Image (cartoon, helix red, strand yellow):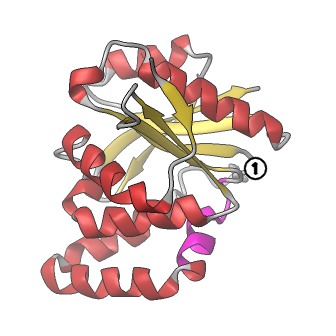
Amino acid sequence: MIRYRAPTITESEEIAVIHLKTFKNFFLSSLGKSFLITYYTSCIKSKEAISICAVDGNNRIIGFCFGSLLSKGFHKKLIWSNLLPFTFQAISILFSKPKAIIRLITNLKKDANLEDDGDYSELLSIGVLVEKKGQGIGKGLIIAFEKECGKESVKKISLTTDFNSNDAVLSFYKSMGYIVYGQFTTYPNRKMFKLIKNI
């Protein structure tokens, strides 16, 4: 039986491992396990974030989703409130992958649309172990996330997904009631969809 609950800080490493397995060729994965642990630990601690994990009958994490209660300025606040660990990560990345710092800063801004005020919650990351896909876990995670948003009187939720070669994922989000809000390109040249859902 699959349950959905809030993860603990000590489980951030387990979540980072699932992220790396699920998103092998993605930019955040290229920043390494240590960065992901810092990021997910910071989200779990934040009162402005929603963190949910899916666990099996043995209480083993098999999926996760993270998001912000308010998209606008979320990452800036998250970094400032965890400045020391993120500074350590930035220095490490600067020496190992200097160009990645530029990409990280540029992409965190998400200035896709100057008319977009960011006045909505945002689903930032969702992943399910490959061997557990097709069991409705992703759907369950989104439903749990939306329920938590509803408790905080959130009216809209956004998410972003790849534009190219991503029909199955896009269809999944549309089946969950998300509507394409617009398109944008992240640094250096990754085309994305932004979707919005009224709840």
The amino acid marked with disc number 1 is Asp
Residue under the image location 62 percent in, 34 percent down: 145
- Horizontal and vertical percent for residue 166? 31, 24
Residue under the image location 33 percent in, 17 percent down: 167
The foreground one among 155 and 83 is 83
Give the magenta range. 71-79
- Seen in the image, is 18 located left or right of residue 95? right
Tell me the chief SS of the magenta region.
helix
Question: In the figure, 70 relative to 52: above or below?
Answer: below
- Horizontal and vertical percent for residue 138? 44, 24
**Residue with the mark numbered 1:** 119
- Seen in the image, is 187 located left or right of residue 7? left
Q: Residues within 10 Å of mark 1 (few under 14, many from 20)?
A: some
Query: Any magenta on residue 78?
Result: yes
- Seen in the image, is 195 located left or right of residue 26? right
Query: Any magenta on residue 147?
Result: no
In the rendered image, which quarter contains the C terminus? top right
The foreground one among 12 and 119 is 12
- Horizontal and vertical percent for residue 192? 40, 39
Question: In the figure, 49 relative to 90: above or below?
Answer: above
Residue under the image location 70 percent in, 61 percent down: 47
